[in-house]
Image (spheres, rainbow, N blue to C red):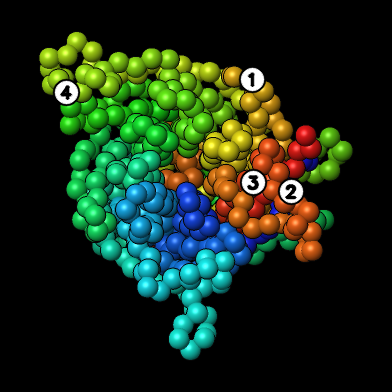
Amino acid sequence: MPIKQVHSIPAHVDRIWNLAPHPTLPLLATATSDKSAQIYSLNTYFPVAQLDGNHKRSIRSVSWKPKTGSNSEVVLATASFDGTVGIWIRDNDRFAQDVGSTGVIDDNGSIGLEEWEFVASLEGHENEVKCVDWSCEGTYLASCSRDKSVWIWEADESNEEFECLAVLQDHTQDVKHVAWHPNEELLASASYDDTIRLWREDDDDWVCSGEIIGHRSTVWCIDFDKRTGEGEARLVSCSADETVRVWSRQSMTGKVGSRDFPSTFRSDPVSENWQQEAILPQRHSGPIYAVSWSGLSGRIVSVGADGLLVVYHEVKKGEWLVIAEEEDAHSVFEINTAVWSKKWKSTAPHGQEGNAEKDETNPDNEEIIITGGDDGNINIWEVTIQK
Amino acid sequence: MSEPINANPKILSLEDLPTRSTASRDIFSDASSPKAIFPYSALDDAFPPRPLYEGYSSLLLLGENGLSGDDIDMKMAPELSSGESDVDDDDADFDEHEPIDEQEIYDLISTISDPEHPLTLGQLAVVNKPDIYIISSKDATGRRQKISRVIVEITPTITHCSLATLIGLGIRVRLERCLPPRFRIEIKVKSGTHQSESQVNKQLNDKERVAAACENQQLLGVLSGMLATCK
């Protein structure tokens, strides 16, 4: 198979639910059923921080706040089955300057872990919070729960005070996943009710602007195409119906320009029309728990209960081929999460780093896939297609 | 005390339950054994309903909230016992000469107590050996695939039994604790035996809901009581 495992980190004893690489820093966060989150360096694959003691039940999901403009803090949100969302900030006076090191070297010269501060607990959901995601500019944080609702939060500058802007209750069952568009303030949510919904702001109100019906069972995970042009939107979804599907926005109304009018005076309410563009080649047997769409290569990866890892490539718009497949990617265990990441650590053998200098035209040298499973391991993969 | 949902279920005699061999059947005829395995006697009597756990009604509401991580008021829930894993969580059985078979699955789950009657799921015919399937597949080269499926179809005693979700969860927890991780467990209501079949099936096989339910100490207490009669 043209995919190889380049590293494996025995991170947790318990199930890893979710993994999130920082958008711009070589940091990886884990969410696990041992109620903790860990931060790993993607330069060294060593742990740099342990975030525990605040959640009372499993941590299901983690999301990094993007660093933009004057916002210099490193902020992580954690969603827990205890019904809360936790906000954690790295103590900038006490973090590893070179994130490639194994942690902080203190005054005595010994190595310790970074200090992270638990700064806020967002309460409001009635029961398990299943997913959190920061919007592209870090302006909003979205959370979703078994209580069937999606909440949109806005943080103050300190990241310690959060205001709930909207409680969206259109889904008829648990909401499993939320994801923001890479450059629009457009939110998508996936549910146990087999649908995906789209949400955007309309005259200070957040409204459901679209609904995607097609999956025949729980939609577990969604991810937007990060390489679309302005005004375009595509997303990939995976489901317990054993399919991975790509959807694209055909049209939208009530957007730019009309925002200054109160919606009651407008004839074009905010709405978008989405259509299925493709069902990806079917490989999985059993629920598919995660998909990720690479912003670099445009490839998609999917993983699920069958332990299979599949990489898809778009030959032309709407036409996808499987280019790599790995059985038992976490031994006999189920795989809960898979995500593309920039490759920070060189995997060339020692002494050959110079020769293996980056070939910018080949994304295989630039990106990795990171997976997490019920075995508590983090596995790192490289696609090795010869061009 | 609430009325039991099915006050007068049909009960199988111990001798009629499937066992591995006549040799083990002989053990059953030993005067002391049946009580050790099934701690309830006088099986031919109509049973007075056992007092339900206080606050039990929240579990009776099947629907979408049946499997939940909500705190449920169950003051009388028994203590959670420890060390219930009968089999080490490893791949040891993969190369064993005697792979896990349907009888072994039956033995693991038929001794679970019904949440409502002082009887086992085997005695109530909620769990039946012909409704247990183990599916192991081979790849193109004839090599046995590492991952196998175990499918258990349960037969609720009545078609509107709102405890079906709880019973299914008990079976799933029992098997998850006892079987090696290479098994994918599917618990289903046998076709045509429950009015909300698809809803119950969807809940019982939703990994996230099951995981969240298993972090609910009150619910775990009830499950622990159901599993206390297992060998």
Which residue appears at 48% of the width and 69% of the height? Answer: A97
- Above or below, B93 against A180 in this view is below
Specify whether disc 2 shares its chain with disc 4.
yes
Which one is closest to the eye, mark 3 or mark 1?
3
Q: Quadrant of residue A56?
A: bottom left
Of A229 and A141, nearer the camera is A229
Which one is closest to the eye, mark 2 or mark 3?
3
Q: Amino acid at mark 4?
A: Asp
- 10 Å neighbourhood of mark 4: few (<14), some, or many (≥20)? few
Dot 3 falls on a residue whose secondary structure is loop
Residue A366 bears which disc, if any? 3
Mark 2 sits on what residue?
A4
- 10 Å neighbourhood of mark 2: few (<14), some, or many (≥20)? some
Q: Earlier in the sequence, mark 2 or mark 1?
A: 2
Q: CA distance from mark 1 to mark 4?
A: 39 Å
Mark 4 sits on what residue?
A260
